[in-house]
Image (tube, rainbow, N blue to C red):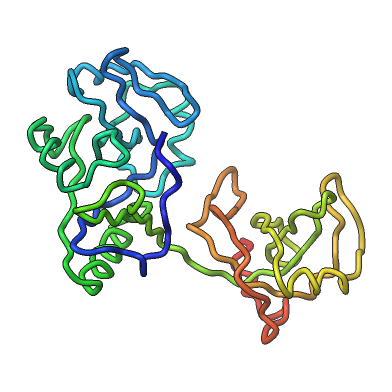
Amino acid sequence: MIPKMRTDIRQARLPARIEPKYDGEFCVWDYKRGVLVNRFGTTRALPFCSRLPKATKVMGELYWGDGKRNFYEALSHLKRNDPALNFVVFGVYDLSMPYDVQLGLLKRLDLPKEGQVKMIEGSIAVSMGEVEALTALFSHEGYEGSVVKPLPLGLSHWIKVKPFQTIDLAVLGIVKNKNSVSVGVPNALPYGHIVPKGDLLDALGNMAIVGTDKEHYLVNPSVVVEVRHLGFIISNGKISLRSPQFERVRYDLSPQDIDKERGK
């Protein structure tokens, strides 16, 4: 299967093709068996598979709706193999093949640019300014992010760029296995969990435990942290963060500085 992609845009090799990243499930089209195969080996035989190449193993993203930052909304559709799912092809399944060669093969497949099965569209960048402009454009348009694909190199040089945001939240509790902490707005439900690092680990030792629940040791919310995330998920009136990560301790803020409107 496809290896984990790089994430540091500073490593980008040019010229490169910049493509939007749809928010779905990575799959490989196994034309010999006539099925899509995801990272976990689960196979899917969907009605549109008959439109995929008859003799070329390609990879792409299985998505629902418009595929724009809606993975959690789409999850139930992915699980039940909804016939309204779509598939966008973004490469030939050959991990070492240079991407300019892949593009030549994909063009010969003559896949449509629109429809339930389509070829992903992208643009060529020859400078870092163009890379930054295109990744910002795809983020603005609502895609999960972008993928930077150096034309003369293989998949090991692809770079995934995601539009992280940041939010300041208070530490509300320590998970009982002590591998993570809950963060959120004081006097409201937590927004999620992060793995503490660096000076946050030191700060945890000074937090006063004021109670407990099934999962947490509850602490007096005295420490504010900056959290990176990929957007908000709202389900049944509950707010949570997508892929939250610890960024830094905000020594300049107190929990009283946090906008309580975020918890509503």
In the rendered view of the protein, which quadrant contains the N terminus?
A: top left
Q: Relative to residue 246, is residue 114 depicted above or below?
A: above
Side of 16 where 46 appears, left or right: right
Which sits in the foreground, 148 or 187?
A: 148
Side of 11 where 252 appears, left or right: right
Residue 142 image offset from top left, x and y in percent: 33, 55
Task: Name the residue at the front extreme.
Answer: 96
Count of numbered marks: 0
Residue 14 image offset from top left, x and y in percent: 22, 64
Residue 217 image offset from top left, x and y in percent: 87, 56
Task: Name the residue at the top extreme.
Answer: 33
Q: Relative to residue 150, is residue 87 depicted above or below?
A: above
In the rendered view of the protein, which quadrant contains the C terminus?
A: bottom right
Side of 130 where 73 appears, left or right: right
Image-quadrant location for residue 63: top left
Residue 106 shows in this picture: yes
Side of 43 where 88 appears, left or right: left
Residue at the image position 73 percent from the left and 75 percent from the top: 199
Residue at the image position 66 percent from the left and 69 percent from the top: 169
Which sits in the foreground, 208 or 245?
A: 245
Residue at the image position 77 percent from the left and 68 percent from the top: 201
Image-quadrant location for residue 12: bottom left
Residue at the image position 24 percent from the left and 20 percent from the top: 48
Image-quadrant location for residue 37: top left
Which sits in the foreground, 151 or 172?
A: 151
Residue 90 shows in this picture: no
